[in-house]
Image (cartoon, rainbow, N blue to C red):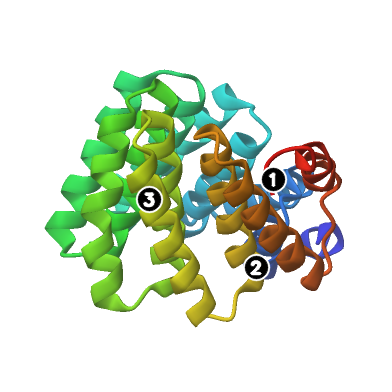
Amino acid sequence: MAVAADLGRHDAVCHFALMLSGYLFHRRRWHDQVAVTELGLRSALVLGVRSRVGPMHETLGRALCGLNEHDRAKHHLAEALAIGRACGDRSAEARVWKLLGTVHTRCREFGDAMGCFRQALSISDELGDPVSRAHTESEIARTYLAAGDLGAAAAVYESQLPFYRQVGAVTIEAFVLNQLGTVHAMLGDFDEALRRLREAQVVSRSLDDEYAVAAAALRIGTVHLQLGQVREAKAAFHCALKGFEAGGATDRELRNLLAQLEDGPR
């Protein structure tokens, strides 16, 4: 990419930087993503094309958030937001508002985070984009969790289920059910926690996702353990361990926990 920039092929650098950045983001290689995107940003600035510069600032802000460099992330996201407004790109504005909310949440600036999320929701509704709204709602639920408002987080997750079921987003439905189970367990509502986690298992089995089934079983075992139901906990943990090992993963901590429970009821 540096050679291409030296040759003046800045448009190609921008295109490749965004493609490679997405790959690095999904592999959580934040340092590499920042380096690649900074090269892309320099080329975009040379071109002087706002439609190139804005996405680079947005992508760089997301990567810096992954590195917990929150002040730098806010700076680049503010630049992306200004460019989105200038270009009339409302979808970009919604994305950046959501990202800014996430950064504020990580900084434990919950009021500022919710203000950003409200902006994102407003634009999503204006555009008639329910998917963007759902993504923002997920971030709102995470913010409530970070702030310790478990009831509000549970309410958001509950409100999302009908939409994900309607559009057939089965993987996300399973994730939301797992989150609901976890939150209800934290609230001490163990019966509801077990109900939601078992629903998550059923959905994950329909996808043949054995790892997700095992992860739900692990949570189910933890709830049973909280209830003092050692026999049920052991059964769930064995199910989880079997699923993890079938997927090629090992869990030494889970094995150790099962060993400690062997003296309990059978």
Residue 263 versus residue 9 in the image, above or below:
above
- The residue identified by callout 3 is 95
Chain-order first, disc 1 or disc 3: 1
Report which quarter residue 163 is drawn in.
Answer: bottom left
Q: Report whether residue 255 is seen.
A: yes
- Label 1 Cα neighbours within 10 Å, binned few <14 / some 14-19 / many ≥20: some
Callout 3 secondary element: helix
Comparing 116 with 38, the one in front is 116
The residue singled out by tag 1 in the image is: 38
The residue nearer to you, when weighing 230 against 171, is 230
**x then y, percent, for residue 231:** 62, 48
**Cβ atoms under marks 1 and 3 closer than 8 Å:** no
Q: Residue 67 placed where, x, y %?
A: 68, 34
* Mark 2 crowd level (few <14, some 14–19, many ≥20, 10 Å Cα): few
Q: Amino acid at mark 2?
A: Met
Tell me which amino acid carries mark 1.
Answer: Glu
The one of 222 and 181 positioned closer to us in this rendering: 222
For the residues labelled 1 and 3, the Cα–Cα distance comes to: 20 Å
Which amino acid type corresponds to the residue marked 3 in the rendered image? Arg
Give the residue pinned by disc 2. Answer: 19
Q: Is residue 17 left or right of residue 2?
A: left
Q: Residue at x 41, y 73 (%)?
A: 170
Q: Nearer the viewer, mark 1 or mark 3?
A: 3
